[in-house]
Image: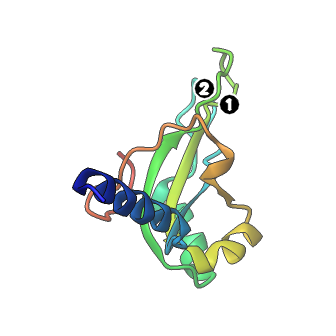
Amino acid sequence: MKLPTLSLIVCLILAGCVHMREPNTIMVYKYDGSVQCEESGVAVEEMRLELTRAGVEVLCGRKAQDGRAYPAMCGAATGRINVYTIQASDLVRAQGLGFKSVETLPDAGIPPCNGGAAGDP
């Protein structure tokens, strides 16, 4: 067998194994309740307490956008969400508090965690 062919086979096998691993963490979100033309919405740290009081370890928290379009008018929703990285084993507990997996928002603009720190950008 030629070296390039063998290399290709090894790469394909390793790539397949990567997708089979169960992730240890997952991102969940909840709308912050903010509306346009008002200083409103639940802060990241405040909502984080909801999770930690329920025994969910929060590794990172940040503000994000859900990726949906909203009409520009006072009182309308903003689409701002609070996103938290948690252990995958805590997903059911977080869902019981009204959080959802970010996988339900395919167009969401979620910034990376900054050194694991929680808080508003």
- Quadrant in the rendering for residue 96: bottom right
Tell me the kind of residue under disc 2: Gln
Q: Is residue 115 left or right of residue 77?
A: left
Give 27 or 70, whichever is nearer the viewer.
27
Separation of marks 2 and 1 at Cα, in angstroms: 6 Å
Quadrant into which the C terminus falls: top left
The mark lying in front, picked from 2 and 1, is: 1
Quadrant into which the N terminus falls: bottom left
- Quadrant in the rendering for residue 60: bottom left
Give 70 or 4, whichever is nearer the viewer.
4
| Of pointers 2 and 1, the one earlier in the residue sequence | 2
Give the percent coordinates (x, y) of residue 119.
38, 56
- Quadrant in the rendering for residue 115: bottom left
**Which colour assignment does the render follow?**
rainbow
Give the percent coordinates (x, y) of residue 2.
26, 55
Classify 11 as above or below 22: above
Tell me the kind of residue under disc 1: Ala
Give 20 or 5, whichever is nearer the viewer.
5
Q: Is residue 75 left or right of residue 7?
A: right
Classify 24 as above or below 18: below
SS at circle 2: loop
| Residue under numbered circle 2 | 36
Q: Evaluate whether residue 118 shows in this view.
A: no
Give the percent coordinates (x, y) of residue 85.
48, 64
For residue 12, the mark is none
Classify 20 as above or below 78: below
Q: Are marks 2 and 1 in contact (CB under 8 Å)?
A: yes
Give the percent coordinates (x, y) of residue 78.
61, 31
For residue 77, the mark is 1
